[in-house]
Amino acid sequence: MIRGAAQGTAPTPLSVLDLVTVGAGRTATQALRTSVDIARLAENRGYHRYWVAEHHSMPGVASSSPAVILAHLAAHTDRIRLGSGGVMLPNHAPLVIAEQFGTLEAMAPGRVDLGLGRAPGTDGATAAALRRSDRLNEGADDFPQQLVELTRFLDDDFPDGHPYSRIHAVPGPAQATSPGGVQDPNRPPVWLLGSSGFSARLAATLGLPFAFAHHFSAQNTLPALDLYRENFRPSELLSEPYAVIGVSALATDDDGTEARRQVLAAALNMVRLRTGRPGLVPTPEEAEAYQFSEMERDFVQSWNSNVIHGTPDEVRSGLDELQKRTGADELMLTANAHGGDVRLRSYELIADAYGLPSA
């Protein structure tokens, strides 16, 4: 299912993007337990889907293996759609991704999304280690060809004479064509993710749903969405464009003071990442005591201008305005904060603000 239904008074379906962030003084085990708690809450409160992003070599982000995390979440949920936001296709062999997501589809039939990106999700040196090659541009340039290969593995439809025509991604359609075989008819729908115009145009050309990373590339949001909508060609999967945007959003119980403290800590984490010093998400106290340079302060101001944060009413108003301005078909919320309890509470407060149902 691509299209979801808006719940409560929300202008669109609301979803969750999880980076499995790890705060200073916390462990990856605690972060992953928080992910389970958020996924359960999201399912019970009417969020449409729950995606996990692929990142590498970042101590504060424990989502290096989306397929593994999604399998864990599938075991703790029953209805919510689960997916990658995204798997970075140039980092992996297409056959491996088809096998992983075929397995996930077998675990959670009819509720798995395969979101794909072409960026490495890390720095160049780490990308080289992942790909065992230092020709990183080649991997990105080959993205359309890799996408075709992956799709053919998912559909098991390489033409006769192709070198891979006798290779099958299992679990997958080949099981249905084997003697006595029975195969679930579902296969994970492919989404393209992006932070610029490349994936927007490719998704449009192929008639695929598109997810844009507004949360870290806000200046490109409107041009990319326009490009996607203007060039969209209907496909068997989708008759008209469907665009999701990722949005940083954090609500707290007080007058917004705690939200501002948490957002400052998350921004300091980004400062360190952008300057080659990735680490755990600092505490709000550490961020308040940190002596920002003028350049760092400018970065923080610019970064936080695209983070919708404050009271639940302020966050709801900010999300409403953003959806109206972009025309997004779905808002995918990511809550970046030091503590897992703050992130969990934020999703609950936003659900309350929109009157989302409570199972």
Image (cartoon, grey):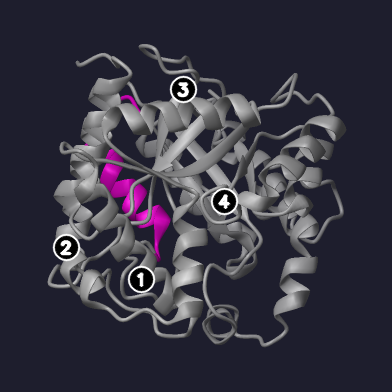
In the rendered structure, does residue 78 fall within the stretch colored magenta? Answer: yes
Query: What residue appears at the point 18 percent right and 52 percent down from the top-left corner?
Result: 340
Q: Amino acid at mark 3?
A: Pro
- Say which of marks 2 and 3 sits in front: 3
The image quadrant of residue 308 is top left
| Dot 4 alpha-carbon crowd within 10 angstroms: few under 14, some 14 to 19, many 20 or more | many
Query: Callout 3 environment at 10 Å: few (<14), some (14 to 19), or many (20+)?
Result: many
Tell me the number on the disc at residue 13.
3
Residue 102: x and y, percent? 49, 44
Q: Is residue 93 above or below residue 245?
A: below
Q: Is residue 165 visible?
A: no
**Residue linked to disc 2:** 29
Structural distance between the alpha carbons of marks 1 and 4 = 37 Å
Nearest to viewer (mark 1 / mark 3): 1
Q: Is residue 2 left or right of residue 61?
A: right
Q: Nearer the viewer, mark 1 or mark 4?
A: 1
| Residue type at numbered disc 2 | Thr
Measured Cα–Cα span from mark 1 to mark 2: 23 Å
The magenta region covers 64-80
For marks 4 and 3, the one nearer the N-term is: 3
**Considering the numbered disc 2 on the image, is that residue within a helix, a strand or a loop?**
helix
Q: Three-letter amino acid code at disc 4?
A: Ala
- Determine the image quadrant of residue 118: bottom right
User: Is residue 193 one of those drawn in magenta?
Assistant: no
Identify residue type, mark 1.
Answer: Leu
Q: Which residue is mark 1?
A: 268
Q: Earlier in the sequence, mark 2 or mark 3?
A: 3
- Of marks 1 and 2, which one's residue comes earlier in the chain? 2
Decide which of tag 1 and tag 3 comes sooner along the chain. Answer: 3
Say which residue label 4 marks: 98
